């Protein structure tokens, strides 16, 4: 009776991106190779940025800016397999001047396969020195901050 | 005036699959890492099979059958870059009892970046012995054979 | 005068494995793609097991056993670049019946580029159910446990 | 009766580089993912260049020069598996002003698993325009040309 809606439709509120599992993603254990989930998480963050109008190649070439991953906590709950259609969610957990923390999950239907917390920072593309977010980007991301337990 | 339609809309006739370029696909040269195109080609062949109702994971687990690549000729014409949205085409060039030859191309808009000829064979998933295509699969693929120069 | 030897030659005590950075490991940012460090960590754990006489392919085929990663905490300190020769260290932090926690680092000369804590569990290769370590493996790994701050 | 020495020790004459197969290299078919052999071939070419004193990162940063793959013919003879220790050979088949053709093979003990012919060209790292080999590099590589059937 008090079933939370979020348990049956877990990714409606957050941004999520579909990802199909191909041969290249799997290993001889018959499941997705664990490091490949890390790439899946980034694909979704890239699409989340694209949906906001931030083209990363443009940021790199025109503004000498790239986002780099500073820290990452991953929990692998269940394996994904060849041909699975996954959904990778992206939510902004915390925005600071020099970094953003994302809360992400990977789902197959309503099964959560992985949770992650990913801290990224903006750096100069050529020198790899921290540069902080510019004001516009900071304000935009700050608005998206949600107190999430995703 | 006599512009061929195929030069402006090159992939209308063949099956094609969209592929976005992410950080994971690129290398320090600033372009897509050359081996990654080989994976892009397979994603498109997998989707081509899926569109025909052939689920590879099902073939592997229920029929002990996987398709393996036997030979491949690749020509790299132009590089793809981060954020590019590519199209990967698939056409059946030749079907034999023991193998299929695909003609594939990778496009960015109307620019062809890569052409490939890929020969695959059906093998037993457990023993990796050639098993040939079964009659139904052979007939289905034979019908799709096109004298292509793609 | 009281310089700890471990600060100048940091990986002498722990097992470590050399890894060269190739084009495939880098991305368009000019540095190693972040998910690739996760693979580097596993190469070193595989070699650590091999050095102990545990062949993973044999464990999978003969004992239906594979180790899977359950959780991982990664801190990315500095980027690695093409041609770098890295060292990846492996130390056993904690051994339980159902899991092992490794402390790992990636070094370039005496610069630490990454630290990781990796929790793995033994599962049945076919069913992916937790099976725990067998007694011999448990005892062997237990002896290697070190109170490390690596 | 006149067993050729080259059949029992096939890679003595050419440069060859050892490569271990890790989980990351395999796929759900239980063998090495086919695109990964393409990366193995490049690792060996990189080491071949390093053995000649040509550091690619230096060529890129100081001379704005990278080698790119223009064309590739691959024949996949037998699969490699997890834990296999492979040898990847490199021989110079043909050197021209604008390109080099390598003949490469991948071996496990005295079994040949793959043969490849790989054509590379020197391009400007920033503009990706063909620049040809400089005279010193051309002369050095020309001397290494061998009429090989490897």
Image: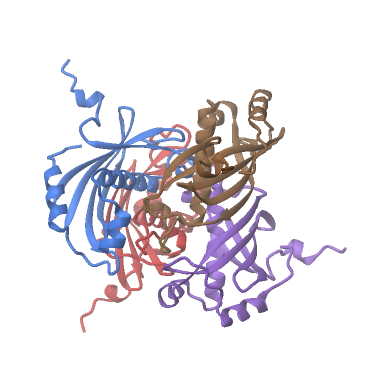
Chain colours: A purple, B red, C brown, D blue
Percent coordinates x, y for residue D88 in the rendering: 31, 38
Percent coordinates x, y for residue D19 in the rendering: 38, 38
Is C46 located above or below residue A19 in the figure? Answer: above
Percent coordinates x, y for residue C149 in the rendering: 64, 43
Farthest residue toward the top? D1
Residue D148 in the figure: left or right of residue C4:
left
Q: Quarter of the image holding residue D79?
A: top left
- Which is nearer the eye, A65 or B109? A65
Residue at x 23%, y 67% (from the top left corner)? D129
Is D129 located above or below residue B124 in the figure? Answer: below
User: Is residue B62 in view?
Assistant: no
Percent coordinates x, y for residue B131 in the rendering: 40, 36
Residue at x 59%, y 42% (from the top left corner)? C2
Residue at x 62%, y 46% (from the top left corner)? C117
Q: Quarter of the image holding residue C29?
A: bottom left
User: Is residue D132 in view?
Assistant: yes
Residue B66 in the figure: left or right of residue B95:
right
């Amino acid at each position: 009776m008090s079933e939370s809606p979020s348990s049956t439709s877990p990714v409606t509120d957050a941004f999520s991106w579909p990802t199909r599992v191909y041969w290249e993603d799997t290993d001889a254990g018959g499941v997705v190779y664990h490091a490949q989930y890390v790439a899946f998480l980034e694909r979704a963050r890239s699409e989340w940025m694209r949906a906001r109008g931030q083209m990363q190649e443009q940021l790199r070439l025109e503004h000498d800016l790239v986002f780099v991953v500073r820290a990452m906590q991953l929990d692998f709950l269940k394996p994904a397999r060849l041909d699975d259609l996954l959904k990778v969610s992206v939510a902004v957990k915390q925005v600071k001047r020099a970094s953003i923390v994302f809360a992400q999950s990977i789902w197959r239907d309503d099964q959560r396969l992985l949770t992650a917390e990913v801290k990224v920072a903006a750096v100069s593309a050529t020198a790899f020195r921290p540069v902080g977010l510019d004001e516009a980007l900071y304000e935009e991301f700050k608005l998206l901050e949600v107190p999430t337990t995703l």
